[in-house]
Amino acid sequence: MAVSKKVEALTAMLAPAVAAVGFELWGVDLLQQGRHSLLRLYIDGPDGVGVDDCATVSHQVSGVLDVEDPITGEYTLEVSSPGWDRPLFSLSQFGRFVGNEVSVRLASPLNGRRRYKGVVQRITDSEVELLVEGAAVLIPFAAIDKANVEPNV
């Protein structure tokens, strides 16, 4: 999955602050829109995530961001739970959802397709194996642009 150096640096910088208040930093999105950016953090906890939890993490992370000042220009900080259709940011996260259905969008076509929906069978050091329409498909993790767990509702 192509993750920018900026997002990697932000993840490394903010994960300890999120962990300090009892949560896991599930993922980071940085959407740059001209002079204004949106920094979205997804957090997870052993008992889920509520609005007060998001406020606690936001306060904790804001202190780190004020001191480190890693984002040029104006930005909005948003802290959220991953939700039912949680985004997947790492191979290890795919591993936590073996047996679950996921949707994957690729940066460029693989076997003539950019979108796949299938059940996670296994992961390797660099690939995700999905069962798609009865056939196993190996998808290089580096080729994934976006992935989400499909809700079971």
Image: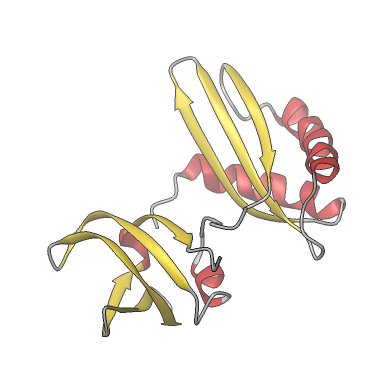
Quarter of the image where one finds residue 76: top right
Residue lying at 54% horizontally and 48% vertically, measured from the top left: 8
Q: Say which quadrant the N terminus sits in.
A: bottom left
57 vs 89, left or right, is right
**Residue 57 in view (yes/no):** yes
- Which residue is situated farthest in the front direction here? 153
Find the residue positioned furthest to the left: 112
Q: Nearer the viewer, residue 100 or 34?
A: 100
Q: Is residue 123 visible?
A: no
Q: Quadrant of the C terminus?
A: bottom right
- In the image, 63 versus 115, the foreground residue is 115
Q: Measured from the top left, where is residue 135 in percent x and y?
A: 25, 84
Q: Position of residue 32 (x, y in %)?
A: 46, 27
- Is 127 left or right of 69, judged from the image as shown? left
Tell me: residue 24, above or below residue 124: above
Q: Residue at x 59, y 33 (%)?
A: 39
Q: Is residue 58 above or below residue 21?
A: above
Please give the name of the residue rendered at 78% of the width and 42% of the height, measured from the top-left corner: 54
Residue drawn 49% across and 14% down? 35
